[in-house]
Image (cartoon, rainbow, N blue to C red):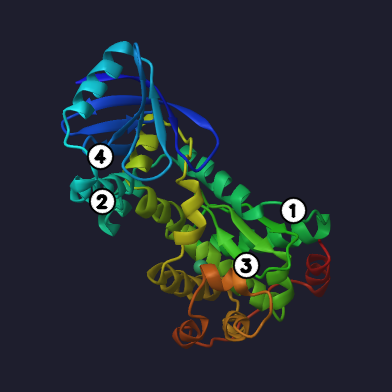
Amino acid sequence: MTEGPAILFDGMQAARRSVRASLLPGALGIRDEDGCELAQWPLVGLRIIDRAAGSIRLAPSAGDARLDVSDPLLAAALGDAVAAMPQGHGRWWFRAAGLAATVLAGFWFAGPLLADALARVVPASVAAKLGDAAVAELVGEDKFCTGVAGQAAIDRLAVTLAAAASVPTPRVQVIDSKVINAFAAPGGQVILTRGVIAAVEGPEGLAGVMAHEFGHVHEDHGIRGVARAAGLHLLAMAATGNSKLGSAGAGVLSIANTRAFERAADAEAVRILGNAGFGTGGLRDFLAGVDKLTGARGFLNTHPESSERVKAIPLRPGTKPVMPEADWKALRQMC
Ligand SMILES: [Zn+2]
């Protein structure tokens, strides 16, 4: 196998990327510097954009991506291999097959069971870094709310709920956004919005939302979601201890909450609230009302089918108040 350094222009971002290119049987393989496969471009349909002494610029059959190879041996081998392939518009089916193969090679989806097995071998340090990246993505331009008394109230509730959930106490932060959302990131940190605190009817509703998120934490849904989306790339990160995300992080928010994960987190929430002595009515009321609330789009994106979920949550009264009135007041004013 001929292999060497190359520069990839992916056609979507302006950035150039140092990669490793190799001539495989029937294809040009492109890996990132950590050895994760980025793409395989079939030699059939591969276009030579430019060829000079010791270097070559190649493009796949479709799209704007380009690969510059300046390693003389590899450039010569690739140039000869591409030139030996059938070319021309009459070979459109070769091009179509090549495009399909490129798409398949570029996206590898792990089956859920394999992905869950994968998630179990991911070191906590890698999960935590993935979580940081996901949180940065979710927070975006928003600011964290810094009210000291409000944060202290949240921290106390987090300690109570974590003990009830049998998980290490997650770090819970509030962002100053009117969008109604809550999110449990890989590695166990939880993000709430000002919007979700405003949308719940009282402390019991907030405890319900947090218990649901702690349910995600208990079930490791964050990292399992990433494993389902990023598959082998995640395994490579785990194996090397490297947490450079590439595009894996971008998928965390969109895929983390599958239907099955939501049902499991709701069931966990019922268990956690029960262990803590808190009622389930607040969570039910929140879910029942969330469809009607303006600004709920964020929550509905990541938490679908709220009306169906309400039916699955038994109504149980609490045996004690979730927090003193002063804590709740401080919490509502922490942004
Ligand atoms: Zn959820």
Please name the amino acid that badge 4 sits on: Gly
Q: Is residue 140 above or below residue 58?
A: below
Marks 4 and 3, the one that precedes in the sequence: 4
Camera-near label (4 vs 3) is: 4
Q: CA distance from mark 1 to mark 2?
A: 44 Å
Camera-near label (2 vs 3) is: 2
Camera-near label (1 vs 4) is: 4
The count of marks equals 4
Query: Mark 1 sits on what residue?
Result: 144
Q: Which mark is residue 181?
A: 3
Q: Which mark is residue 45?
A: 4
| 164 left or right, relative to 139 | left
Q: CA distance from mark 1 to mark 4?
A: 50 Å
Q: How many C-alpha atoms fall within 10 Å of the one at disc 1: few (<14), some, or many (≥20)?
A: some
Q: Is residue 228 above or below residue 313?
A: above
Q: Position of residue 169 (x, y in %)?
A: 58, 54
Where residue 37 sits, quadrant-wise, is top left
Residue pictured at 28% horizontal, 38% vertical = 40
The kind of secondary structure element at disc 3 is loop
Residue pictured at 75% horizontal, 57% vertical = 151
Query: Mark 2 sits on what residue?
Result: 100
Please name the amino acid that badge 1 sits on: Phe
Please name the amino acid that badge 2 sits on: Ala
| 35 left or right, relative to 270 | left
Marks 1 and 3, the one that precedes in the sequence: 1
Q: CA distance from mark 2 to mark 3?
A: 37 Å
Q: How many C-alpha atoms fall within 10 Å of the one at disc 2: few (<14), some, or many (≥20)?
A: few
Q: Circles 1 and 4: CB distance less than 8 Å?
A: no
